[in-house]
Amino acid sequence: MNDLFGKPANKAAETPPAPKRTKSTAPEAPRLDEYSAKDIEVLEGLEPVRRRPGMYIGGTDDAALHHLAAEILDNAMDEAVAGHASFIDVTLEPDNWLTIRDNGRGMPVDPHPKFKNLSAVEVILTTLHSGGKFGGKAYATSGGLHGVGSSVVNALSEVLEVEVARDRALWKQSYARGKPTSKLVNAGSVHNRRGTTIRFKPDPEIFGTLTFQPARLYRLCRSKAYLFRGVEIRWVCAASLLRDKDETPAEAVLHFPGGLRDSLEADIGQSPRVLPIPWAGEANLPPASNGEATGRVEWAVAWLEEGEGFLHSYCNTVPTPQGGTHEAGFRAALVKGLRAWGEHRGNRRAAQVTAEDLMAPLAAKLSVFIREPQFQGQTKEKLTTPEATRLVETALRDRFDHFLAGDPASADNLLAFVIERAEERLRRKELKDTPRKSATRRLRLPGKLADCTRENAGETEIFLVEGDSAGGSAKQARNRETQAVLPLRGKILNVASASADKLRQNQELKDLIEALGCGVGERFDRAKLRYGRVIIMTDADVDGAHIASLLMTFFYRELPELVRHGHVHLAQPPLYRLTQGAKSVYAMDDADRERKLKREFKANAKVEVSRFKGLGEMPPMQLKETTMDPARRTLLKVVAPADDRAATNTLVESLMGRRPELRFQFIQDRARTVEEVDV
Ligand code: 0RA
């Protein structure tokens, strides 16, 4: 990459041949009265860009058009990342005018030592490879341009206007298709203002009728704001250009102090994750041997319970969709870190884990900032800086080890999850290699069961939850080694009033029996029960109580041995959370809430009362601490006193049979009034 001040510009070998003038790109002859002959080289330096735009921006299509915006925005981002600018205004106006303004140092306006007639601004905007790289030290990290940015945009713009506010003076200059149409003029003095403004209109001779899409530009701005938390991007778009007003606002202030963590959360939304909160952070890359800083890395990582993940990587805020050396370092740190954790825990199965087992379900963002990065190929979508691998691996390995050791329960959960995937992969392979033999031997389990990894029923339990949303929360809150989760959809049949036939056809109950493994009726075998505890966990409301009672009835009727041996339980999720200052207390129901409001809090200050609409709405951490964690929860055991069978039967009959008014009363009383419910 040429350093404009350090090396001779326009070395003979790089000087393009005199362009053949075609109609579409016909440049005006340089005005020799304003520019000396030796500067013509510089002025014509942009001609190749207009003749072969594809070489510089990858084509002349929609993506290429938006590339222009990205280049200019990247320059401003470089200024922000270097610590000189704190905001960037991006304004889209009718007639395809885009303005990008920063409050950085402003492009230098003094005469360039090499081209005495020209200001540095003009050299930057009219010379290929000059870009923003004025001397290696101007930016700690610089990427955007890949060295050519603003001049390429200038070359491909019908009109480009630059404004620099610097040292209390305002400077302006205009260009048409890369050629100045005015000198750089001092347009007066300014106070309290600094920075660079570029306003341009892409050339229809190049891009035809294509215009900037507000939604696409807005997404670009948002992703840049996520990538550097120190910048505020203010988006303004003429209302007349907005069609889908809900998705793209006319105005927005984009500033994300949470950085990549916010970005990842926005991307994965409510998808169930293996760990309740993403692993996110930032670190300096290890310094060079001479002690000089090498750069920074920032990351946010979650593992998805279901489906394929993604890895979005960036270098100096520029996307690297083809990955590269920074991704290699990231992958190595994670795999080695997790294997080491397995070893530390004495888990020999951890050794079979491959990068693929760990990476496929991973949803992650990785952003590095390094000086003078190298990219591969014309499209520059892959980072090739060789040192990046080692630097990223070293920086992340340490942090990942810390993260795992800091929360052993989560680390074990993650390890179990990945081992599960590794073993699944090996099983599939085995199945493929010897299809018949192993296929018949395998246990059939319902697809939506999130099983635990331990197999000894003495240490395991299964949570029966209502619906996919609650199922998602429960999967995140559980201990994956010992706790399985089975989401049951919709209301299961009312067992007491259903015929045996209907019962057997109910998919939810079929799944339940399959998961339990112990069979029903004639084939019942308690020794085959796969979980020591069966825990009914429904919402703390009337519907939840109804489902819980339907399930209890099912167990009582179809699997009475499980009830008799004390396997069946009710979880007790809270309905309210009461908060005053740092103190939080959970309440089971209205009465409990009133009691606790009186007893547990200071009377003079306000207590915030939040009501959980359902388990699916409860943050997984809270679900874990209140309801699922064996160390902190309370369970109700469902019992059927052997000597009171008749009475119990009557109770079940009256509650779950064909007398709705009794059932209604029961539901009102709620399933968790222990004495009534324990059938
Ligand atoms: C070259 C040198 C300096 C700043 C810039 C370019 C610069 C370029 C752009 C493009 C958009 N915004 C920009 N802001 C600054 C450093 C000048 C100095 O040392 O003061």
Image (cartoon, grey):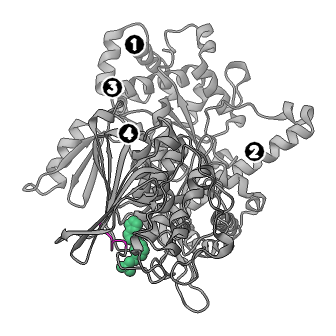
Circle 3 or circle 2, nearest the eye = 2
Within 10 Å of the Cα at label 4, are there few (<14), some (14-19), or many (20+) other Cα atoms? some
- Vertical side of 51 occupied by 581: above or below: below
**Residue linked to disc 3:** 542
Mark positioned earlier in the residue sequence (1 or 4): 4
Circle 1 or circle 2, nearest the eye = 2
Q: Looking at numbered disc 2 in the image, what kind of residue is underneath it?
A: Glu
**Residue linked to disc 1:** 654
Where in the image, quadrant-wise, is ligand 1 located? bottom left
Cα distance between the residues tagged 1 and 2: 47 Å
Within 10 Å of the Cα at label 1, are there few (<14), some (14-19), or many (20+) other Cα atoms? some
x, y (%) of residue 7? 58, 82
Q: Are marks 3 and 2 in contact (CB under 8 Å)?
A: no
- Highlighted range, magenta: 103-107
Q: Looking at numbered disc 4 in the image, what kind of residue is underneath it?
A: Glu
Q: Looking at numbered disc 1 in the image, what kind of residue is underneath it?
A: Ser
Q: Is residue 45 magenta?
A: no
**Residue linked to disc 2:** 424
Mark 3 Cβ and ligand 1 under 8 Å apart = no
Cα distance between the residues tagged 3 and 4: 16 Å
Circle 1 or circle 4, nearest the eye = 4
**Residue linked to disc 4:** 617
- Which quadrant: the C terminus? top left
Mark positioned earlier in the residue sequence (3 or 1): 3
Mark 4 Cβ and ligand 1 under 8 Å apart = no
* Identity of the residue furthest to the front in this view: 33
- Vertical side of 156 occupied by 407: above or below: below
Residue at image location 64% in from the left, 64% down from the top = 16
Mark 2 Cβ and ligand 1 under 8 Å apart = no
Question: Is disc 1 placed on a helix, strand or loop?
Answer: helix
Q: Is residue 105 magenta?
A: yes
Q: Looking at numbered disc 3 in the image, what kind of residue is underneath it?
A: Val
